[in-house]
Amino acid sequence: MRIRLAATFVVFTAILLAGIGFFLRQSLRDEAELNARIAVEADWGAAGGFLHIDNQRPEWVNDRNDFDQAYAVERLRHVYQLTDPDGNVLEQSAIFESIRATRQTRGTPTYDPQYSILHDRNGIPYSTRASWIRDDQNRRYLLAIGRSLAAPYRRADRFVLIYTLLALAMLPLTSVFSWWLTGVAIRQGRRTT
């Protein structure tokens, strides 16, 4: 009886720790995605200040002598794509070229931003925002920008790995504790009867 009680306690503890680990991993990934979406929103606002479309050609306007502006523009262009209404690419980054993105259908009237997590050929995830913008002649273009989720996902996975290793190290201690606790419970039960 003592072995069954102790084994049940250890199995219950293992299932509980595994559930907590799964919940922590998903929570950390959700938090990373939210932070990336906030960063993409900030990038979207910055792109509106630097990107101008002149004669149906994109032009990034910034002071090249200002290191901060030049860095901001290069960061924006790192994961970026601009297409005309027919889906013809006007300009895109090498990373965005490798992303398996589905194009927005032609003539879609929505101007609501579309957020998604897309993966490149190597499986690296990117949080992206795509939406229509207009030039001075009121022609529309589909702009998509994004940020990598690789580093935040790695941090979440590393945290869960450390948690799992600590949880596995706790199971032998849990076994000893449950063996002792069931022994105390059995002795108390015998005294009362």
Image (cartoon, grey):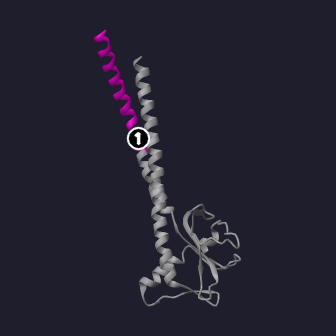
- Vertical order, 149 against 25 (above or below): below
Q: Which residue is mark 1?
A: 167
The magenta stretch spans residue 192: yes
Residue 187 sits in which quadrant?
top left
Residue 57 sits in which quadrant?
bottom right
Q: Residue at x 60, y 82 (%)?
A: 134
The magenta stretch spans residue 2: no
Q: Position of residue 103 (x, y in %)?
A: 67, 69
Mark 1 crowd level (few <14, some 14–19, many ≥20, 10 Å Cα) = some
Q: Position of residue 155 (x, y in %)?
A: 44, 57
Q: Position of residue 188 (x, y in %)?
A: 29, 16
Residue placed most toward the observer, 67 or 192: 192
Residue placed most toward the observer, 4 or 129: 129
Q: Which residues are magenta?
A: 164-193
- Vertical order, 59 against 177 (above or below): below
Residue placed most toward the observer, 139 or 143: 139
- Left or right side of 1 for 89: right
Residue placed most toward the observer, 139 or 44: 139
Residue 66 sits in which quadrant?
bottom left
Q: Main secondary structure of the magenta part?
A: helix
- Left or right side of 130 for 25: left
- The C terminus, quarter of image: top left
SS for tag 1? Answer: helix
- The N terminus, quarter of image: top left
Q: Residue at x 41, y 48 (%)?
A: 162
